[in-house]
Amino acid sequence: MKSEPTTFSIDDLAAARDQTTSWEGVRNYQARNLLRDEIKEGDRVIYYHSACAEPACVGTATVVRDGYPDHHALDPKHHYYDPKSTAEKPTWYMVDIRLDSQFTHPVTLAQLRQTKGLESMQVLRKGNRLSVQPLTKQEFEQVSKLGKGK
């Protein structure tokens, strides 16, 4: 899961009540489909800081609530309002995540590119800007290990 640190950093997640937040505001259909159909409670995620001086994987979190309609899409005063989305037929979805750990060694984009076994990670593909991306168990474990300095 990618977030700009100026919008919602891993430190913000650490400071959130119960170190938990909703992953809201996703307005891309491919990412929405992942939130709605594939990401499930108990899934582990890598928290990635993007659009910053040094993009990097900075920690892990666990999904604590399956995908549910993003209620911000229904609020005309909210930044994520979408007039096409309705309560009866929601367009956008979100999940809740809880912080597991912050990496002692952030895993930079350059390091991901140089690490054998991570070549197929979606975040490394040219032009891939999705805020939610699939990750294999092996990729998760390898990035987590690097983040712990191992």
Image (spheres, rainbow, N blue to C red):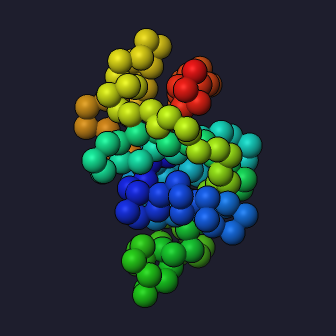
- Residue 39 pos. (x, y %): 62, 44
Q: Which residue is drawn at 50% across and 35% down?
A: 105
For residue 103, above or below residue 22: above
Q: Can residue 15 be seen in this view?
A: yes
For residue 91, above or below residue 135: below
Q: Which residue lies furthest to the bottom in this view?
A: 77
Nearest the viewer among 73 and 137 is 137
- Residue 122 pos. (x, y %): 40, 30
Nearest the viewer among 67 and 110 is 110
Q: Residue at x 36, y 48 (%)?
A: 50
For residue 111, above or below residue 3: above
Count of picture labels? 0
Nearest the viewer among 147 and 34 is 147
The quarter in which the C terminus is drawn is top right
Asked where in the image residue 80 lies, by quadrant, the reply is bottom left
Q: Which residue is drawn at 72% across and 53% down?
A: 64
- Residue 1 pos. (x, y %): 50, 46
Q: Residue at x 54, y 63 (%)?
A: 12
Seen in the image, is 92 located left or right of residue 51?
right
Q: Can residue 37 be seen in this view?
A: no
Seen in the image, is 127 located left or right of residue 131?
left
Q: Which residue lies furthest to the top in this view?
A: 116
- Residue 83 pos. (x, y %): 40, 78
